């Protein structure tokens, strides 16, 4: 029997299936070694923006979807998929409930510590909400930055240096980015407070966090593009922000599992179905 981490709830966001930068195999490996009563997929799991533009679907992306379905079918896990901005094609289907899978805008998680409001968080991003063209333009810029980052880290690896994230460095050092993240977190916390919750759990900004903002416990699950982080609610009610690098020391990733097996979009049936939804 494979060793597993037994928790009450697991929360992932921003896997961005359909992009070459998605770490879908690592995300699937995480789910393979977690047993949870409830799995919350907190938005931007499938990147509909990229799939309708120039996205690519790989076997690893299909493996992630199958891993989620395995949890539902064989492990009796309840799955709550919350809409993000990159998978906003789901908006026309909400709310939807079929069996142990729910599609929703947001979710209130009942815990031993109290109620936690779970939502993707794009509703607090003025560019995403009111200026869709600029949001798509920003997405193109982020994709370019990730390509540059891949080349830069290839050069660093040749010199024996560790991975370095250009986007994280920009977020930490550029005044406007730091200000945006701070305001975003405060707005999420304020909404949770107004909804009568003791905590808030979101994604969207790809910045993992576990902190207290005034009286609200604020958690951000990060992403599976660069940070590779998730949130779990342990059986004793304690929340933990898990870094995949640490997780993989306990549950090692099999050699060759995270292979680059990108395939063109027309050859994959799932993205074709998504294209029909986004038409």
Image (cartoon, rainbow, N blue to C red):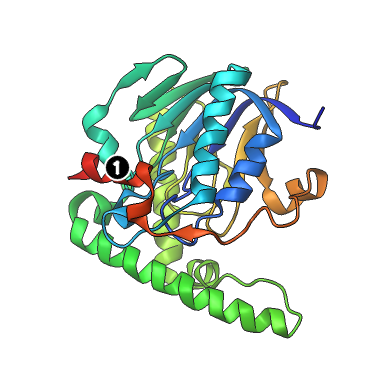
Q: Residue furthest front?
A: 267
Percent x, y for residue 45?
44, 43
User: Between residues 216 and 265, which one lies in front from this camera angle?
Assistant: 265
Q: Is residue 168 visible?
A: yes
Q: Is residue 232 above or below residue 76?
A: below
Q: Is residue 265 above or below residue 111?
A: below
Q: Is residue 219 above or below residue 24?
A: above
User: Between residues 232 and 55, which one lies in front from this camera angle?
Assistant: 55
Measuring 48% from the left and 60% from the top, which residue is drawn there? 262
Measuring 59% from the left and 45% from the top, which residue is drawn there? 27
Q: Is residue 174 visible?
A: no
Left/right of residue 68 with respect to residue 182 in the rendered view: right
Instruction: Count neighbours of disc 1 (C-alpha within 10 A) and say few if under 14, some if 14 to 19, many if 20 or more.
Output: some
* Quarter of the rendering containing residue 135: bottom left
Measuring 29% from the left and 42% from the top, which residue is drawn there? 274
Quarter of the figure that contains the C terminus? top left
User: Between residues 55 and 113, which one lies in front from this camera angle?
Assistant: 55
Percent x, y for residue 75?
63, 20
Measuring 25% from the left and 56% from the top, which residue is drawn there? 127
Q: Which residue is mark 1?
A: 274
User: Between residues 113 and 102, which one lies in front from this camera angle?
Assistant: 102
Left/right of residue 196 with respect to residue 155 in the rendered view: left
SS under mark 1: helix
Left/right of residue 229 with respect to residue 79 in the rendered view: right
Quarter of the figure that contains the N terminus? top right
Q: Is residue 103 above or below residue 136?
A: above
* Quarter of the rendering containing residue 96: top left
* Quarter of the rendering containing residue 150: bottom right
Percent x, y for residue 149?
53, 75
Left/right of residue 271 with respect to residue 230 in the rendered view: left
Tell how many labels.
1
Percent x, y for residue 140?
33, 68
């Amino acid at each position: 029997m494979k060793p597993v981490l037994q928790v009450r709830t697991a929360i992932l966001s921003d896997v961005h299936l359909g992009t070459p930068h998605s770490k879908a195999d690592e995300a699937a490996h995480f789910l393979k070694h977690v047993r949870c009563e409830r799995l919350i997929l907190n938005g931007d799991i499938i990147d509909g923006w990229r799939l309708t533009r120039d996205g690519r679907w790989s076997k690893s992306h299909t493996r992630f979807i199958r891993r989620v379905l395995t949890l539902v079918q064989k492990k009796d896990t309840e799955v709550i998929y919350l809409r993000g901005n990159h998978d906003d094609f789901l908006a026309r289907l909400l709310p939807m409930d079929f069996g142990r899978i729910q599609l929703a805008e947001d979710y209130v998680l009942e815990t031993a510590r109290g109620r936690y409001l779970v939502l993707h968080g794009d509703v607090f991003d003025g560019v995403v909400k009111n200026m869709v063209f600029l949001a798509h333009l920003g997405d193109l810029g982020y994709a370019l930055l990730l390509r540059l980052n891949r080349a830069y880290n290839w050069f660093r690896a040749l010199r024996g240096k560790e991975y370095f994230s250009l986007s994280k460095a920009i977020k930490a050092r550029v005044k406007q980015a730091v200000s945006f993240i701070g305001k975003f977190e405060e707005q999420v916390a304020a909404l949770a407070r107004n909804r009568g919750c003791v905590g808030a759990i979101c994604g969207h900004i790809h910045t993992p966090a576990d902190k207290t903002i005034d009286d609200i416990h604020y958690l951000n699950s990060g992403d599976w593009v660069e940070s590779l982080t998730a949130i779990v609610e342990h059986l004793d009610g304690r929340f933990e922000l898990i870094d995949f690098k640490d997780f993989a020391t306990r549950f090692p990733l099999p050699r060759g599992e995270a292979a680059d097996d990108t395939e063109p979009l027309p050859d994959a049936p799932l993205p074709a179905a998504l294209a029909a939804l986004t038409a």
